[in-house]
Image (cartoon, grey):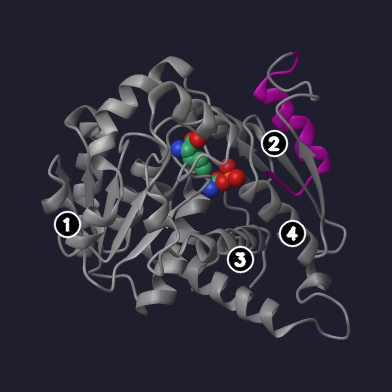
Amino acid sequence: MVDLTGRDFLKLLDYTSEEIQYLLDMSARLKREKKAGSVNGAPLHKGSFTGKNIALIFEKNSTRTSCSFEVAASDLGMGSTYLGPTGSQIGTKESIEDTARVLSRMYDGIEYRGFGQELVEELAKYADVPVWNGLTNEFHPTQMLADMLTIEENFGSLKGLKLTYMGDARYNMGNSYMVVCAKLGMHYTACCPSAYFPTPELVETCKAIAAETGGSITLTENVAEGCKDADVVCTDVWVSMGEPEEVWEQRIHDLKPYQVNREAMSYAKPTAIFLHCLPSFHNTQTQVGKEIAEKYGITEMEVTDEVFESAQSKVFDEAENRMHTIKAVVYTTLGGK
Ligand code: CP
Ligand code: NVA
C-alpha cells in the first residue's frame, strides 16, 4: 500500500513507478469527485485539511502552477500564501536554509519554483514539512503528472506508448518527460539537434530504469524518424524563463526544423495527440511573440497555430489537469488517503 505522508515532491527520479501511478490514480479520483460537485455545499475533502496552510514561493512567473496550488488548497479547505519573485526576503536578505526553517514554523507544506534544482533540494533539506517542486531549470515534476493523466484519459493506459519531445531536450520539460517515460514503461524519443540532447548521465540513468519497466530512450536528430508512429508529440518554448534574450537567434535557427507542424504530425499515428505545458508561442498575440516576429520574421515558433488549434491538441485538458494532479500531490503528502 502506497503512503506518501510527509514526502517531498522534488523530482520523479525520487518516486517509484508504483508511487507515480498512485498519484495519477488519486488525481483521477479527485477530478471525478470535483466534477461530481460538493456535499451539502462544502467542497469535498475540506474537513480533513481545515486549519492547514501552504506557502507558494515563485521566483519565476506562473499562471497554471500558482493557480493550481491556490485552487487545490481552497478545495481542500486550506489557506495559501503566494510569495512572488519580488516582495519577500528570500534570496536577497534571507538564505534558503533560514527561509525553510521560518516557513516550517507556520506552514504545513511549501511549494517552490525557482532556478537550479539544488535550491529546491536545499529548501527540502532544511524544511520540516513537505516541499513541492513547482519547476526548476532541470525538472518540472508536477507538469508530468498532468501530462500523464491527459495521456491516460486519451489512451486508457500509458505503458508501451511512444512519446516524442521536439525542442530543447536538455531543459526541465525534456528531462522530465524522459524520466517519467522511463518510470512508466513508455518509449521516449528526444528529437532535436544533438547539442540539445540531455546529459549522458541522465540518459544512462533513464535507460537503466527503462530496462526494468519495458520502456526505452531514443535520441535522434531526424524528425521523420523521431515522430514516426508516435502516440504523443510534445514540445515546449525554445527559450525558457531565466535564459538571456541573446539566445533567441541561435535557438530559432537550431530549433525551427523541429517545430511541431502538420508535417511532423503526419509521421505520428493518426490517433496521436499533441501536448504543450504552456504558455506557447503559436501566434503573435503576445508581447514576446510580437517582438520575435518583428525581429526575426517568424510568426509561429515551437508549434504552428494549425496544430495548436487542431482536434489532436489536448493542451487545455492538460492545463486543467495541472490542478487535479497538484491537488493529488498536496493531498497525499499531507496524509490524505
Ligand atoms: N506549465 C506551467 O508550468 O505553466 P505556468 O508557468 O503558467 O505555471
Ligand atoms: N521550459 C519552460 C517551461 C514553462 C512551464 C520554462 O522553464 O520556462
As helix, strand or loop, the secondary structure at mark 4 comes to helix
Was residue 102 drawn as part of the magenta stretch in this picture?
yes
| Residue type indicated by callout 1 | Ala
- Bounds of the magenta span? 93-110
Residue carrying label 3: 324
Q: Is residue 108 visible?
A: yes
- Name the N-terminal-most of marks 1 and 2: 2
Disc number placed over residue 57 in the picture, else none: 2
Disc number placed over residue 211 in the picture, else none: 1
Q: Residues within 10 Å of mark 1 (few under 14, many from 20)?
A: some
As helix, strand or loop, the secondary structure at mark 2 comes to strand
Q: CA distance from mark 3 to mark 1?
A: 30 Å
Q: Position of residue 290 (x, y in %)?
A: 53, 31
Q: Residues within 10 Å of mark 3 (few under 14, many from 20)?
A: many
Residue 312 vs 249, above or below: the answer is: below
Q: CA distance from mark 2 to mark 4?
A: 15 Å
Q: Are marks 3 and 2 in contact (CB under 8 Å)?
A: no
Q: CA distance from mark 3 to mark 4?
A: 9 Å
Residue carrying label 4: 71
- Name the N-terminal-most of marks 3 and 4: 4
- Which residue sits at x=41%, y=64%? 310
| Residue type indicated by callout 2 | Ile
As helix, strand or loop, the secondary structure at mark 3 comes to helix
